[in-house]
Image: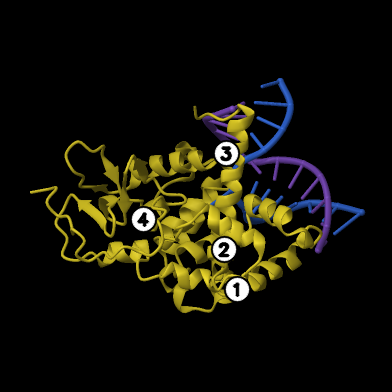
Chain colours: A yellow, B blue, C purple
Amino acid sequence: MPGDHEPRGVPLSRPRGRGGTLSRPTGEGRAEGRFWEGVIGPRWVRLSQAADVIHAETAVPQDTWDWLADYLQLEIELERILDTFPPDPPLLEAVAACRGLRLLRQDPWECLASFILSSTKQIVQIQQIVGVLCERYGEPVAVLAGVAPCWQFPSARRLASCSEPELRACKAGFRAPYLLAAARRVADGQVDLDGLSRRRLAEARAALMSLPGVGRKIADCVLLFAGGFARAFPVDVWVLRALRELYPGCRRLPPRRLLEFCETHFGPHGGYAQQYLFQYRRSARSRDAVQAGTGSSP
DNA sequence: TACCAGGAGAGCG
DNA sequence: CGCTCTCATGGT
């Protein structure tokens, strides 16, 4: 019977630190109160966290929870990551403000496709587009009673079989031809996403950037969030703002020099530093908006 | 109404 | 290179 498959702390030891960020940067998971619900690969799952364990519920019995431990990156010890950060005040402040923030190990194709759809879109809009794609072209997944229907993220092969107008109809806009071309090249094996993690950083990045609609920023996102390249440091508008405000020395650096600074200064796990700076800067914007009375939250 | 959003690519000088 | 323009579309 469904609802009967909780690990009850058996396979999942709680990661160090207070809490974890369980929402996907671009995914459709939702945090509802003390729960997080979403689809990880082909499975629907509801997560919650008690004192020392992560509690997981699925709609179908599981033989193993390795897939979840991998997604949550439970083997990563956060303190060891933070120990590699340079001890400069801005980064320490960002870490203090986002204590417990961790990275997930996402599916490469889902990650790539989502970020291709991300350019000049707000995060809520990206989630909406992804939701439409899943509903129209993804395989349905089993959920617990009372939970809204859910779908897997559509495979590259499935999206490759779509027409450009069909993808535009999902609100993909000018990104539709990029997504379609990427889906085709992934589906026919011209780009091996699952093999990225075995290659050198520069080679994996070049392979991603050979895809239309994939520049340095999106490539680094895929490398960091799905490829296991902890040093990859995506520079988006928020990180750029954070860097210019917190590190005055890099204000007048040309783009090439700025990227060099990011990849060297923040060390072998710079991508984690990037996430702390990103979250820190965005949360500052939220506070300002609320104070200025322009925020949407009460 | 005007402006902006987790960019990328093409066309300039 | 470094700058500017364009590409859809929804929200504020």
Q: CA distance from mark 2 to mark 3?
A: 20 Å
- Of labels 1 and 3, earlier in sequence is 1
**SS category of the residue bearing label 1:** loop
Q: Chain of mark 4?
A: A
- Of labels 1 and 2, earlier in sequence is 1
Q: Dot 4: few (<14), some (14–19), or many (≥20) neighbours within 10 Å? A: some
Are both tags, 4 and 3, on one chain?
yes
Q: Are marks 2 and 3 in contact (CB under 8 Å)?
A: no
**Residue A282, can we see it?**
yes
Q: Which residue matches tag 4?
A: A155
| Amino acid type at mark 2 | Ala
Percent from the top left, x then y, of residue A254?
79, 62
Circle on res. A273: 2
Q: Chain of mark 1?
A: A
Q: Which residue matches tag 3?
A: A286
| Amino acid type at mark 4 | Ser
Q: CA distance from mark 2 to mark 4?
A: 31 Å
| Amino acid type at mark 3 | Ser
Q: Closest to the observer: A224 or A200?
A: A224
Residue appearing at x 47%, y 62% in the figure? A225
Q: CA distance from mark 1 to mark 3?
A: 29 Å
| Amino acid type at mark 1 | Gly
**SS category of the residue bearing label 2:** helix
- Of labels 2 and 4, earlier in sequence is 4
Percent from the top left, x then y, of residue A236?
63, 54
Q: CA distance from mark 1 to mark 2?
A: 9 Å
Q: Is residue A7 left or right of residue A100?
A: left
